[in-house]
Amino acid sequence: MPVIRILREKESPALFKNLVIGACLHITTETANLVITLKKCGAEVYLTASNPLSTQDDVAACLVKHYGISVFGIKGENTSTYSRHIKEVASKNVHLVIDDGADLIVFLHNNRSLSKNVIGATEETTTGITRIKNIEKDGRLLFPVIGVNEALTKYMFDNRYGTGQSTIDGILRATNTLIAGKTVVVCGYGWCGRGIAKNLKGLGANVIVTEVSPLRALEAVMDGFRVLPVEEAACCGDIFITATGNAKVISGNVFDRMKDGVILANAGHFNVEIDVEILQKMAKKISEVKPLVKEFTLKTGKRIYLLAEGRLVNLGCAEGHPSSVMDMSFAGQFLSLKYFVENPGLTAKYHKVPDEIDNRIALLKLNSMGIKIDALTPYQKKYLNSWNLE
């Protein structure tokens, strides 16, 4: 993660002095790099998991033992423990918040007394930004939030290339299935869906896309994919992957139409996209055939295989995004927190990542890769700022 390393070396060790940072993130090696950097820049850091299945226990232990960072997260923790851990971090009188899914931000809004010291928060995911915008729409946003997920250096790389690769990695590790020749249904054609579909196509899959947005559906068609309603796609697919950020995308009617032996995986942040509750009611038998692979045998005898309990398959069954792409996302988190420190008193509303931060991250990444680019000449700058071209 060279960009994070550069920031750790160049930024002041007192940048976040006397500030408490509460982070609700997937506890992985990439996250460890970020929180270690925050501590080296003077912060007191508390970290909790943003998903019950995404914690790497060895990473959590290392952060506690070797770096003195308080970590609240255990792989496979139940919902009660997960919620308790978020409460633990929220109770530390945090000044800055880093979130992935907005669970910590929502908790602070539901417990207003714990948010009195918060000067700003950042959000990493599409799902989390949707929640934050809904809080703002209701007139209840208590502090400014920067949507890191909407930075170009985040969604164009993390969502597209990171999710595109790591989702398939999770499916392969869990099932060792052959992708080539399979019909794979990708539900949702946002940046994550785009990346998943592109990688599947490269592996030889026949990809069907389902969408509710006419523009995204049209884009999928123009990209060479077949587009169908999910109920029509149900009888065709061998593998189904959800990446919508919405609930009950695959539910009862779709399950009924599926072939025997289909695999279900979710790439969205929360475990609501595949209607697991309905699937459980439809099953006459449920068994775990491999770790994080459940076989649901329906009353008809048809079998459906669910990965990672319907949670994030790339982190439940694999290790999440490669570090080289998380490098840019977490640089966005770091520099957005720095922006709060350098611009106190921001309005309590949703903010986009400033362009200068996006451009700095991209340039640092290029430099770390040994890639040089052109610069505008004075004449070109003048031309681009002129309207009378005579």
Image (spheres, rainbow, N blue to C red):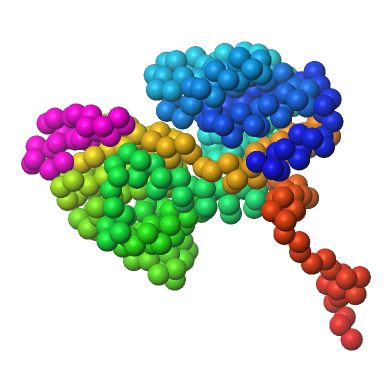
Which residues, given as a range, are shown in magenta? Answer: 279-303
Query: Residue drawn 46% across and 19% down?
Result: 74
Q: Nearer the viewer, residue 43 or 62?
A: 62
Q: Quadrant of residue 174?
A: top left
- Name the spot of residue 166 as percent of width and height, x first: 45, 45
Which quarter of the figure is the C terminus placed in? bottom right
- Name the spot of residue 203 as percent of width and height, x first: 37, 59
The single residue placed furthest to the bottom in the displayed view is 390
How many marks do you count on the picture? 0
Can the viewer see residue 361 in this picture? yes
Q: In which quarter of the image is residue 382?
A: bottom right
Can the viewer see residue 346 in this picture? no
- Name the spot of residue 244 as percent of width and height, x first: 43, 47
Main secondary structure of the magenta stretch? strand
Which quarter of the figure is the N terminus placed in? top right
Query: Residue drawn 40% across and 70% down?
Result: 224
Query: Residue drawn 51% across and 42% down?
Result: 321
Query: In the drawing, does residue 162 fall left or right of residue 202?
Result: right
Query: In the drawing, does residue 181 fall left or right of residue 72?
Result: left
Q: Quadrant of residue 338?
A: top right
Query: In the drawing, does residue 368 fall left or right of residue 218?
Result: right
Magenta residue check for 301:
yes
The relative height of residue 43 versus residue 257 in the rendered view (above or below) is above
The relative height of residue 152 versus residue 321 in the rendered view (above or below) is below
The relative height of residue 220 versus residue 41 in the rendered view (above or below) is below
Magenta residue check for 198:
no
Query: Residue drawn 13% across and 38% down?
Result: 298
The single residue placed furthest to the left in the displayed view is 300
- Name the spot of residue 67 as percent of width and height, x first: 66, 19
